[in-house]
Amino acid sequence: MFQVKGFFQQFLGTPLTTGACGDSDADIYPTVRLPPVEVVDVEQLHDKRDRAMRHLVRLNHLEHAVLYGGYRGFKFHNHLPHHLGSAYLLGANEKQLHDIFDEEAKDMEPWTPSPSEVTEEDWRKYLGDHNYQRAFLDFFEDEVVRQGYEWKAVLMEFLLKGEKPLVNGLFCGLAHPLIHLGYAIEFNNREIAMEALTLTAASYTNIHSYIESDLPPPTPLSSKDPLVVLQRVRDDPRWDGVFDNPGQHNEHDIFPKSEALFLEFLNMLDVGNMDPNHLFHALVTTSTLLLTTTHKPENPQFDFFLLHTLTAAYAVRTLLPAMPAKHHLALLRGLWLSILYVYLTQMRPSVKPELIENVVIGGDGGDAGQGWDWLVKKAMQDELTRPDAHFVKGVRALRSFAGVYGGGEGKEDSAEGTFFLKAATKFVREYKGWVGFTYSRETLDIKA
């Protein structure tokens, strides 16, 4: 394994420094200082499970569209690289990887031809049109060939360069392009990277404009705590009756009907005057609490869409050390936007930190005292009988954040490490399936 520091910087044409991100602008812009993720380059590894991972990622790339099916105007996303990657990093063997592929492939759709090609002159014209996903993939892969197979240079060109770079579009489509890109970086994988660009282009919406807008000045209501802002959202009667049921379809009601109100709360978090390291830590903590503590106390449930705030946070964690510092604040603003947006679409559930505080670890000799080794083993055992891409992604994100904030991956000997261990223990022990959809309203601790 190797580190991803300087992932994009090698193509920036500027000398590297000893700044936190290998970026000469790290002392100019607000910078989140995180260690780079460890990268597993399965192209260079030769065990059976390495070969299986390499083969299955490539097979998915060749056979399956990145967007398929749909519900209420929203397309489903191809999660196979996320599922395979998370299971691989949690220790899945080659049979488990093949079983995951076979199960998920049942729902996938093959690539279909786009209405036309897209070119260097007109590709922006088709942004946001999922009918052009195949044309976008062909266009980006042609660019890889044109640039001598330097696929990271192609990523940088479209994500970071030009008058309207695509980087802030990563948060469209429930942040799936962002999550996909995180796996491309962790596995140093060209196919997943071009899929991430394709998802960004085909999922593009106006959400990017909220991230690119100027930060407003602070007001007396400004807060440096995202949980305070979410509690104000929950308490504000102006949101009462806006939605009938939880689900991503509520995006149709947030932006056209309640845009000004949404922006009021989006701007209430004073991101421009916060230490970016503290801000990111607070957003990670918030996303963890949203996943694990928003159910009714007597009926543990886990919301499918709130999980995406945690997996988006982990993708941002992956990108931050790889991105030039000038883009860090935008990534944090995009993550906060995603958290607020999903919190609203899921109808403002109550956040109850005591549900994590009350988790008992150790002392009884049972599974609660077994720590991360037990959690990962239990998660992978569950994966054998109930394959679930999102479940293993959540477990892996929590374990990784315990490493970032708990003194090293898998360590639980600090308050922060214990927080993530408790959250993961609760999640693994109580998980029975996902809620958060239209039909599961009565099981959620939400506010209509």
Image: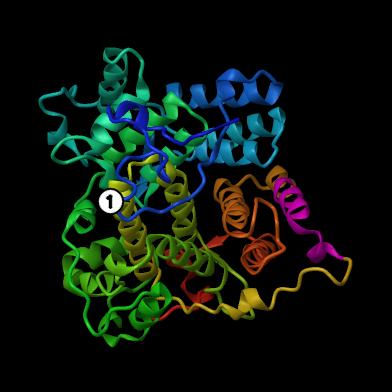
User: Could you say which is closer to the camera, residue 114 or residue 9?
Assistant: 9
User: Could you say which is closer to the camera, residue 38 or residue 97?
Assistant: 38
User: Could you say which is closer to the camera, residue 163 or residue 243?
Assistant: 163
Quarter of the image that includes the N terminus: top right
- Residue 133 appears in the rendering: no
Circle 1 Cα neighbour tier, 10 Å, few/some/many (<14 / 14–19 / ≥20): few
Kindly identify which residue carries mark 1. Answer: 28
Quarter of the image that includes the C terminus: bottom left
Q: What is the chief secondary structure element of the magenta stretch?
A: helix
Give the residue type at disc 1. Ile
Where does the image place residue 208, in percent across and percent down from the top left?
22, 52
- Residue 416 appears in the rendering: yes
Where does the image place residue 394, in percent across and percent down from the top left?
57, 54
Is residue 379 located in the magenta-colored stretch of the structure?
yes
Is residue 113 located in the magenta-colored stretch of the structure?
no
Relative placement, left or right, of 42 versus 235 is right
Q: Image height check: is 267 above or below 85?
A: below
Relative placement, left or right, of 61 versus 358 is left
- The range drawn in magenta is 366-380
The outermost residue toward the right is: 365
